[in-house]
Image (cartoon, rainbow, N blue to C red):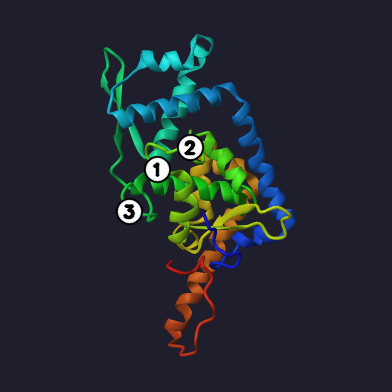
Amino acid sequence: MAPSSPDAGPSCAGSDEGAQGPEEESSGASQAAPSTQSTGKDPLARKARKLVEFLLEKYTKQEPITQNALMKIVSRKYRQHFPEIFSTARERVELVFGLEMKEIDRRGNIYTLIRKLNLRGNDCRRDEGALPKSRLLMVLLGVIFMNGNRATEEEIWEFLSMLGIYAGRRHCIFGEPRRLITKDLVQKEYLNYRQVPNSDLPRYEFLWGPRACAETSKMKVLEVLAKFHGRVPSSFPDLYDEALRDQVERAGQRGEARAPTMAEASAPSRAKSCSSSHI
């Protein structure tokens, strides 16, 4: 899939600051690495991933979900951890895919998955499947933020594998995921997909696109990703501080944008950054 050019699209004020400086980039990456690596090795996390895949399969087939079937996937060895594993899978299915689990038979412990109706955000609002795509986008933006405001293609796919989403394998909700994140979301300017500068071998990376910068914030994205990991935003202190600075900068830019109108200034405005556009 042809990526966008290295100069395609403006960069976020504050977002590319982290991408430009090696110190800030390493700071974000150091916080992301333990979560991703430990999740890949954690047997409970692997069981949660299998439950997520099972739940999505049942949703696609419109079949009821029994607790006995869930217990079999967890296996007898980890049965004592079933409440924790089930809670993690349930939260991720809701957070990323927009599916809510409802109990339809208390005596038989039978559940079903239903599509949540409300959409909290503007992302991909007019598209079919808008809810799950917008939620997946927020998670992707969080991965980029946690990796120093730019994430390599390998880092993105490593994270998505925790959700049972793999390159080249058609997904029951998102279709072909590589097309979605390297073409569809890029064309809509939510993601910037480009070749890594000065790399010996062709490697590609993801950055926030201009519409993502305009329609969400680092704090909102951090809240989503922290919830994904079962933590709170302040548990990532460096990222939390950067998100707070981003809020202050956005507030200042909104004030600057209003100033010419109040003063009825006729001078042309300075070039817009994507973090101030559409806000």
Q: Is residue 32 visible?
A: yes
Which amino acid type is marked by label 1? Phe
The answer to whether marks 1 and 2 mark residues whose Cβ atoms lie closer than 8 Å is yes
> For the residue labelled by badge 2, is the local secondary structure a helix, a strand or a loop?
loop
Q: Position of residue 134 (x, y in %)?
A: 40, 49
Which amino acid type is marked by label 3? Asp
Q: Position of residue 225 (x, y in %)?
A: 52, 42
Would you place residue 188 above or below residue 85 in this image? below
Residue located at (61% from left, 64% from top): 6
Would you place residue 195 above or below residue 74 in this image? below
C-alpha separation, residue under disc 2 versus residue under disc 3: 20 Å
Viewer-closest of 234 and 267: 267
Query: Which residue lies under the disc numbered 3?
Result: 127
Would you place residue 48 above or below residue 4 in this image? above
Q: Earlier in the sequence, mark 3 or mark 1?
A: 3
C-alpha separation, residue under disc 3 versus residue under disc 1: 12 Å
Residue located at (45% from left, 60% from top): 187
Query: Which residue lies under the disc numbered 1?
Result: 174
**Left or right: residue 269 compared with residue 36:** left
Would you place residue 215 above or below residue 101 in this image? below
Which amino acid type is marked by label 2? Ile
C-alpha separation, residue under disc 1 versus residue under disc 2: 9 Å
Q: Position of residue 15 (x, y in %)?
A: 59, 59
Q: Is residue 229 visible?
A: no
Query: Which residue lies under the disc numbered 2?
Result: 165
Q: Earlier in the sequence, mark 1 or mark 2?
A: 2
> For the residue labelled by badge 1, is the local secondary structure a helix, a strand or a loop?
loop
The answer to whether marks 2 and 3 mark residues whose Cβ atoms lie closer than 8 Å is no
Q: Residues within 10 Å of mark 3 (few under 14, many from 20)?
A: few
Viewer-closest of 227 and 155: 155
